[in-house]
Image: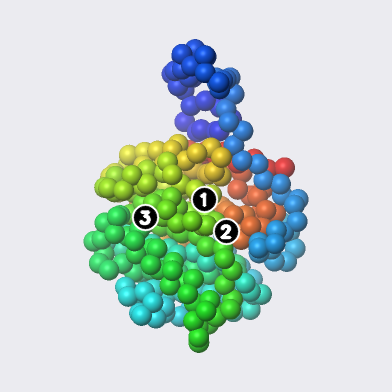
């Protein structure tokens, strides 16, 4: 069953809320089981904020194809990040640039993430694909390494000789697949100032850090998983559980893709065009701060088997 933030998920939950309201009626706050929290509203007509990145004319549609900018890549110095990482960045877009650090899945290698680099870089966003110390590292190790890679990316702004010297903004996000998604949920809770978090088939079932459950996430979060991913890898309600745990004053989206499994995330387009379009619009809206893209993150994709968001636009 598809879910929407404007409706209750079950009569059972609604009945429980009524009971709670009756029990708590003598306290200073009130409950209204007939309504839900208003969630988050985005004004798509507001001017670009002081530290936001708004390029060109207002978008007419989102895209699952590479964007208008040329791009290239280079390796982060091992002295900055020992496990190794690749930085994809636009070469003919006007800086400053926002940046994302992408953490791989269990047993996964950096090459499995590579197709996302040109996609985001060609749309003006820097993407770092990182390796982990070993492919068998746990969620609780991956989040530490993702933070290290994020610090290394930030340091590129001031590193002498870096292709990104003087070109990075203060707008950063994290992204991860499977156990990398669990690491992303932890860092979305722990790292101050993040502008976005995005998980693909996120896994937190083996994580020891309770922040992997999502209750302390502080930045806008896009959660995507496949409807056929029913294993411990990224199924068993892990993504939907994190969505439910995120506070309703934090922008959040849950998109479950019909017919897609755990290993269907190697390219932006492989799970279905809507995944790439949504990912781009989400990062443009929140990572870069260009709210003109907001209309594209509230449109339920045709191939969604489950869809929920607390975001509204005007």
The answer to whether marks 2 and 1 mark residues whose Cβ atoms lie closer than 8 Å is no
Q: Is disc 3 placed on a helix, strand or loop? A: helix
Q: Which residue matches tag 3? A: 183
Q: Residues within 10 Å of mark 3 (few under 14, many from 20)?
A: many
| Label placed on residue 118 | none
The residue lying at 49 percent from left, 43 percent from top is 254
Say above or below: 221 vs 52.
Answer: above
User: Which residue is disc 2 drawn over?
Assistant: 287
- As helix, strand or loop, the secondary structure at mark 1 comes to loop
Residue at image x 45%, y 52%? 188
Residue density around tag 1, few if under 14, some if 14–19, many if 20 or more, within 10 Å: many
Counting residues from the start of the chain, the first of labels 3 and 2 encountered is 3
Mark with earlier residue (1, 3) = 3
| Mark 1 to mark 3 CA distance (whole Å) | 14 Å
Say which element carries label 2: helix
Relative image position of residue 76 (x, y in whole percent): 42, 78
x, y (%) of residue 47? 75, 56
């Amino acid at each position: 069953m598809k879910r929407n933030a404007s409706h209750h998920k079950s009569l059972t939950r609604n009945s429980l809320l009524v009971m709670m309201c009756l029990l708590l009626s003598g306290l200073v706050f009130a409950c209204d089981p007939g309504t839900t929290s208003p969630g988050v509203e985005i004004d798509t007509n507001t001017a670009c904020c002081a530290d936001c990145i708004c390029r060109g004319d207002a978008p007419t549609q989102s895209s699952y194809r590479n964007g208008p900018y040329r791009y290239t890549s280079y390796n982060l110095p091992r002295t900055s990040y020992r496990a190794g990482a690749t930085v994809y960045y636009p070469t003919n877009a006007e800086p400053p640039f926002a940046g994302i650090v992408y953490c791989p899945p269990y047993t996964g290698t950096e090459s499995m993430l590579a197709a996302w680099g040109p996609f985001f870089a060609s749309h003006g966003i820097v993407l770092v694909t990182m390796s982990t110390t070993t492919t068998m590292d746990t969620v609780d190790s991956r989040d530490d390494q993702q933070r290290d890679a994020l610090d290394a990316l930030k340091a590129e702004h001031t590193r002498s000789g870096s292709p990104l010297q003087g070109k990075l903004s203060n707008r950063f996000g994290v992204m991860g697949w499977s156990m990398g998604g669990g690491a992303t949920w932890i860092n979305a809770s722990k790292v101050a100032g993040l502008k976005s978090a995005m998980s693909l088939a996120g896994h937190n079932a083996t994580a020891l850090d309770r922040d992997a459950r999502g209750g302390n996430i502080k930045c806008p979060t896009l959660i995507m998983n496949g409807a056929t991913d029913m294993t411990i890898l990224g199924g068993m309600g892990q993504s939907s559980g994190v969505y439910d745990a995120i506070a309703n004053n934090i922008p959040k989206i849950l998109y479950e893709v019909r017919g897609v499994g755990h290993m269907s995330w190697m390219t932006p387009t492989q799970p279905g065009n809507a995944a790439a379009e949504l990912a781009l619009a989400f990062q443009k809206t929140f990572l870069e701060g260009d709210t003109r893209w907001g209309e594209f993150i509230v449109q339920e994709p045709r191939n969604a088997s489950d869809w929920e968001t607390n975001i509204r636009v005007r």
